[in-house]
Image (cartoon, grey):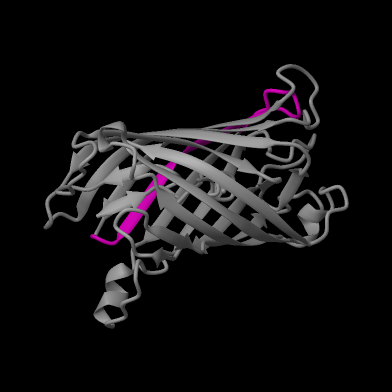
Amino acid sequence: MKWASLGQSYAARIGVCAAMVGLSGIGYAAGEENKVNAGRVHFAMGADVVSAYHLRGLIFEDDGMILQPWAVLNANLYSGDSESDIQAVNLKLMGWGSVHEKRTTAKNTPEKWYECDGFAALQFAMFEKWMFEGGVHTISWPNGTRDAATELYGVVAYNDSEFWKDLDIEISGFNGFQPWMMLSIEMDNTFMGMPGKRKSGFVDMGIKPKFKLVNSGRLPVTLNLPVTVGFGLRDYYGTNDSSFGFAKLGVHTEMPLTMVPGDYGKWQVKAGVDLILVGDSPRSYNDGHDSFKPVGVIGVSMAY
């Protein structure tokens, strides 16, 4: 079994990381063959160029170039056999950033480095189909936009691919809906950075099905259709209004760079668009943006 830690929105973040189930990391269970790296330590890195900065319904920049690099280090601490309840335990360290050409709300240098996030977590692959992850997430703004904040988070994900196989549903590249849920609780300061605002939390949940568009051995193309919904807890946005944050449908195509030798890792490129429905509470901070926002994305990544 292989878990690709949620993103990208962690990537790969989800909500604060878009993507994260597995949160943009890579987990390996016992007995899995990895032709690129057969060891217990793996890493992945990449960068996306997006048309707008989005996080939890908040769209704070949509002008100029926005670059969002990320990197993940995964260390397999334990691998069980096929009879074990726990198939794998992984340590995951991740970094994510957002660099803006337009110096978004900068108060000091480096003016273009808008956000820098760090994650440290333990990830458990259990009962052949479940993944549990828990850790700490720090959010900082190097350009002085607001004070740094810390959250504790937990993720649960379910691998439903076998369910569809048992129903004899065979669609090229389809591996189930892969449902997941993430809970983030503020511990030190708040993400919104409001003086006197009580600490709160946020819930992300979604699915991430994928399909094979081009079933070619040399240049296969995969279609990913991730869906994410986010809700604030206990007056998260500080507006005493609706808790609904956003709903997002991603339409992404991915293609491996098969011309790169395997000794240099597994490389791939992606392109697509995120269609975002923004709730009333976050929209009040979005400088007049409408409730619907398409965000284009292109990116490249490598895993080893």
Is residue 237 part of the magenta span, yes or no? Answer: no
* Image quarter in which the N terminus is found: bottom left
* Residue plotted at (67% across, 23% down): 142
Disc count in the image? 0
Who is closer to the viewer here, 288 or 211?
211
The extreme right residue here reads: 288
Is residue 138 part of the magenta span, yes or no? Answer: yes
Residue 82, picture quadrant: bottom left
What is the span of residues highlighted in magenta in the rendered image?
128-149
Who is closer to the viewer here, 230 or 237?
230
* Image quarter in which the C terminus is found: top left
Residue 278, picture quadrant: bottom right
Q: Left or right of 197: which side holds 9?
A: left
Q: Is residue 269 above or below residue 95?
A: below
Q: Position of residue 218 (x, y in %)?
A: 32, 53
Q: Position of residue 55 (x, y in %)?
A: 66, 47
